[in-house]
Amino acid sequence: MSEQNSSETESPTVAKNNTVDALVAALIFVFGVVITIEAWRLGARWTSDGPGAGYFPFYIGLITIIASVGIFYQSVFGKSRDTGPFVNRVEAVRVLSVLLPATLYVLVVVFLGLYVASAIYIAGFMIFLGKYPPVKSIVLSVIIAAVFFVMFEVWFKVPLYKGTLEPLHFLGY
Amino acid sequence: MTELSALVHGFGVILTPMNFGLMLVGIILGVVIGVLPGLGGANGVAILLPLTFTMSPTSAIVMLSCIYWGALFGGAITSVLFNIPGEPWSVATTFDGYPMAQKGLAGQALTAAFTSSFVGALVAVVMITFLAPLVAKFALKFGAPEYFAVYLLTFCSFVGMGKGSPFKILVSMALGFALAAVGMDTITGQLRMTFGLTELMRGFDFLIAVIGLFGIGEILLSMEEGLQFSGKKARINAKVVWETWKELPRYWVTSVRSALVGIWMGITPGGATPASFMSYGLAKKMSKNGPKFGTGEIEGVIAPETAAHAAGTSALLPMLALGIPGSPTAAVLLGGLLIWGLQPGPLLFVEQKDFVWGLIASMYLGNVVGLIVVLTTVPLFASILRIPFSIIAPVIIVICAIGAYTVHSAMLDVWFMLGFGVVGYVFKKLDYPLAPMVLALVLGDKAEDSFRQSMLVSQGDALIMWSNPLVGSITTLALIMLLWPLISKLLAAIRAPKAEQFPEEQPVD
């Protein structure tokens, strides 16, 4: 692994740790504000029959806001802020090469159902990222999907999502 | 000695061929889960949980807890042979385990790791056997304020004992609580935080969060490094095992110390991962071989493994006795109890004797079986890692998606899982702890209920948290834990003013 890493360190940095840190803190701040406002709307105060529905979330929202301000301060002005690379370009491409197909996969599941989409996804992953021969990839992915099918539908009797188009309708499950 | 007779009864409950078979299946599945990157104790159990809905609670918990033991054992295999920690708690095992494997001592390292895991777990189970009923009996007297104080202590301990920014620990926790609040309010029946989306009425299930945070997040992290597994071969035969076993008693001090560290970190929600690091650090400081640590010292394998397994096991004590899990995996098991219709907490020891003692008996038996299974089948499991990552990664993502879907048979959950995966990846990279978020998600409703009930009793007076010595001392302890990062800074400033001499040169960490 060490030889591999030496070439990776030269890859340009996409984002610094403290930049991402500050960005995430800002997002969390917004989240905290939303919770606090929503909790206030629900009734964060004492109602006629005890604490209102927003009583507890209100304080949670406040904690979120205070802590996110703290993180933001530490990441922007803190002495020990970490200016190391969050990801370099090679790493970012690798992560996206898993994340984007995974998102696409979930989208396809909505239409084709878990089994068909999974077979396509595994085969695609093997062909494009693993550089396997297509025939081998397709055969293996179909076998894996079939194993899942037998395990869930037949053995455990836990029906999985078949998709809005129900391509496996002919199997009778 | 009522505990012993209860334990014998427990053995009677689980020693059926069916349960024994489930135990074996659980251990083997657990080791596989522990070996695979992206699947760990917490999300492995979460994914398999829906499959146990039709089993009896005792059989289900026997299988699921055995998956947990298996995962604890399995993490060591990848650490020693591949220098890749299969689980976060086996990171410290790589420090000396992998150098040992490089020297051709993989068999010895693995035997030492498995045996110390076993010893750590055994010490912890003995402790649970005798302590859990006492804690449960004590906790029967708890009212709402006491419960809230214990919840407070649980979460404040994260701040007090965690490393890194206390703000990040707080955020992680608060996010968990906020997500737990989504959906129907249990007391007023109002819809909260749904923003008009009916799909959100169900709320965020923590199982989805666990699968996403630990499963997808872990895959993304592994992918970043562009994993190319290059492993060492392990040959374990009876002779190697025997030789290593003869050597192990010499390090009994390390074992005892590590087991104690593990038990402490497991009961308080420190968890197995910090326990293993702490125990490794202590062993390095206190052993006469300390300077050689990192070059393949067997003691450097014993210390983290004993502690990790002891912590992983003791995390079940507060889960059983109080209904407050000590680790994410214990939290998932607790979720299981609720689904099987059992109410976790002190009453479990009174009303569900078969279940509790069956579980405790299965801890003894499961670890013995686990030790035998891993010692005899290591090469088989190591070969799983020789399957290329480009096949394993999509299959694990598919398994996670299936696991997320089966929880409520809802597609929206699969999207949430993906979202949690991204959050898990970013949070891990930025050193946000994930365990407080998961625990807050699980305990959110109960913590809130006990808080509101306490406030109802006192009509909004926070002083109820100091209304009697018991609740007062727990609350005070919690607040000390919460403020510990500040207190320790103050103490350091008072005690060692001379350390400030070269402030510019001091590494800031």
Image (spheres, coloured by chain):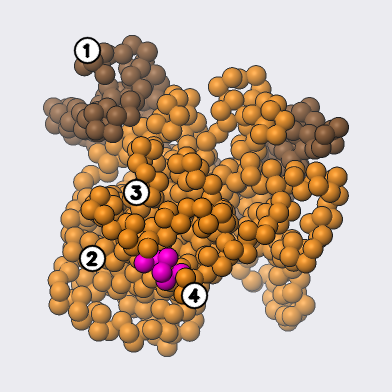
**Mark 3–mark 2 distance (CA, rounded to whole Å):** 21 Å
Q: Nearer the viewer, mark 1 or mark 3?
A: 3
Q: Check disc 1: other Cα within 10 Å, few if <14, some if 14-19, many if 20+.
A: few
Which residue is depicted at the point 16% across and 67% down? B235
The chain coloured orange is B
Mark carried by residue B192 = none
* Residue closer to the observer: B506 or A141: A141
The residue stretch that appears in magenta: B3-8
Compared with residue B409, is residue A4 higher up or lower down, i.e. above or below?
Answer: below
Residue at left offset 69%, top offset 76%: B502
- Chain letter corresponding to the colour brown: A
Pointers 1 and 3 within a single chain? no
CA distance separating discs 1 and 2: 46 Å
The residue pinned by badge 1 equals A170
Of all chains, the one bearing label 2 is B
Asked if badges 1 and 2 are on one and the same chain, I answer no
Do the residues under discs 2 and 4 have CB atoms within 8 angstroms? no
- In the picture, measured across the screen, residue B195 lies left or right of residue A124, that is right
The residue singled out by tag 3 in the image is B59
Give the mark nearest the N terminus, 4 or 3: 3
Dot 4 corresponds to which residue? B260
Question: Tag on residue B372?
Answer: 2
Residues at marks 1 and 4, CA–CA distance in whole angstroms: 59 Å
Q: Distance between the residues labelled 4 and 3?
A: 30 Å
Graded by Cα atoms within 10 Å as few (under 14), some (14 to 19) or many (20 or more), the crowding at tag 4 reads many
- Location of residue A35 by image quarter: top right
Between discs 3 and 2, the one toward the N terminus: 3
Please name the amino acid that badge 3 sits on: Ser
